[in-house]
Image (tube, helix red, strand yellow):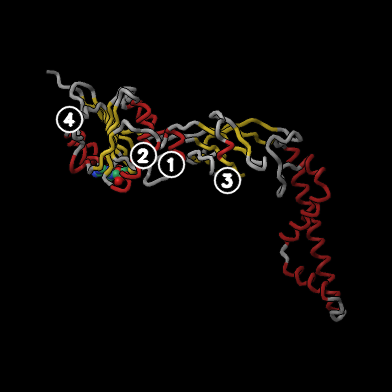
Amino acid sequence: MVFAWISRGLVKPIRINSTETLNTRYGIYPHKSMIGQRFGSQIASNNGLGFIYLLHPTPELWTVSLPHRTQIVYSPDSSFITQKLNITPGSRVIEAGTGSGSFTHSLYRTVGDKGKLFTYEFHKVRQEQALAEFQDHGLDKLTLTHRDVCKNGFEVEGEQVNADAIFLDLPAPWLAIPNLDKVINPELKVAVCCFSPCIEQVEKTIHALNTNGWNSIELVEINHKRWESHKNMVKRVDDVVTRLRDIQQRKKEGLAKMRREKEERLRNEQNGGVDNKNSAATVTAGEKRTAAQALKENGNEDKKDSSAKRNGFNPFGKGQRINQGDPSYEWREVSKDEAELKSHTSFLTFAFKQPAFN
Ligand SMILES: C[S@@+](CC[C@H](N)C(=O)[O-])C[C@H]1O[C@@H](n2cnc3c(N)ncnc32)[C@H](O)[C@@H]1O
């Protein structure tokens, strides 16, 4: 298995098979061309115009490319939850429900060979699809149970669960919380996290945690923001003045052009419409034209003639595409954060249970 990095934001997991081909809008990549390449290699498309990178599978790449069967946990949340629940190699972890298996992959990697992951899903088809994916990806040491954990708890036949961390991504975690005592390690400080999109769910969860002996309850929301860097064009007062003069000039020319057209139309009418069909059509079109359209046309004509001049003083005029960093202009390096937060998915309620003193 390899992850084809096709473009920013588009990663595709593929199973290499020498008879198959990866088709993308950027080109065609026969799997044969990937065989024997090192992870991280860049390979060219058949026509040499596109390229992809071949990346080693990771839980993070799986999270951004998996087939969604449910809402999933994304890396900003999963990484925070993992450290807050103190999940490390050797941890014994409960996860319910399995859903699309996004967090399962990450948890499986963290607990490693010496730990153990128990994951539960009550939707039969989802449970079967998750099982097939886990087998395909070699996640063969976890225990996936088809179970309603709210009604029937977390015990697994033939296994001691003995969990030290629990993650509940369920619509009603408060119904599952009373079932945890039977499967947690009584000798360790145990941590739980409930992942709920609505504050009403959080209230019920906190109530259940309080009444079932969990403490140090904490509510957290992850607001993950990316910072991006750009070049902003430096615009001086002189440029603005020149630009305003240019607008005035074009307005004058546009109005004069409209007047000329109107006069021409009137002349044609007075001459008894002797003009040919084509010019009549031009006149009719002229009649409908708004001042703004005329100005625009005029401006476009200008542009054809004087782009060199424009380059000098009018870098922010309409209709011109200037590549960021174009050396003909002056630029300032700026950084800004994303306007929108895309990562909020849920509230995270954490709580802990200490071992008894006796
Ligand atoms: C939001 S999804 C979990 C997504 C998962 N954390 C991931 O990262 O892909 C919630 C899952 O819990 C399952 N579920 C809901 N109630 C359940 C219950 N009582 N017992 C077991 N699974 C349950 C649903 O079928 C669904 O697949």
Q: Disc 1 on helix, strand or loop?
A: loop
Q: Is mark 2 within 8 Å of ligand 1?
A: yes
Q: Residue furthest left?
A: 358
Q: Quadrant of residue 221?
A: top left
Label 4 Cα crowd, 10 Å radius (few <14 / some 14-19 / many 20+): few
Q: Nearer the viewer, residue 241 or 334?
A: 334
Q: Of the two numbered discs 4 and 3 on the same chain, state the one appearing first in sequence.
A: 3
- Tell me the distance, in whole angstroms, between the alpha carbons under discs 2 and 4: 30 Å
Whether label 1 lies within 8 Å of ligand 1 gets the answer yes
Front tag of 2 and 3: 3
Left or right: residue 351 versus residue 323 is left
Q: Which residue is mark 4?
A: 213
In space, the residues marked 2 and 1 are separated at their CA atoms by 9 Å
- Ligand 1 neighbours mark 3 (CB distance < 8 Å): no
| Residue denoted by label 3 | 24
**Which amino acid type is marked by label 1?**
Leu
User: At label 2, which amino acid type do we have?
Assistant: Gly
Q: Is residue 142 left or right of residue 28?
A: left
Q: Could you tell me which residue is drawn at 26 percent across and 39 percent down?
A: 145
Residue 92 picture location, percent across and down: 27, 27
Nearer the observer, 134 or 11? 134
Q: Are marks 2 and 1 in contact (CB under 8 Å)?
A: yes
Residue 29 position in % (x across, y down): 59, 41
Callouts 2 and 4 close, C-beta under 8 Å: no
Q: Tag on residue 101?
A: 2
Q: Which residue is mark 1?
A: 66
Three-letter code for the amino acid on which mark 3 is drawn: Thr
Q: Is residue 233 left or right of residue 84?
A: right
First in sequence, mark 3 or 1: give its number. 3
Q: Earlier in the sequence, mark 1 or mark 4?
A: 1
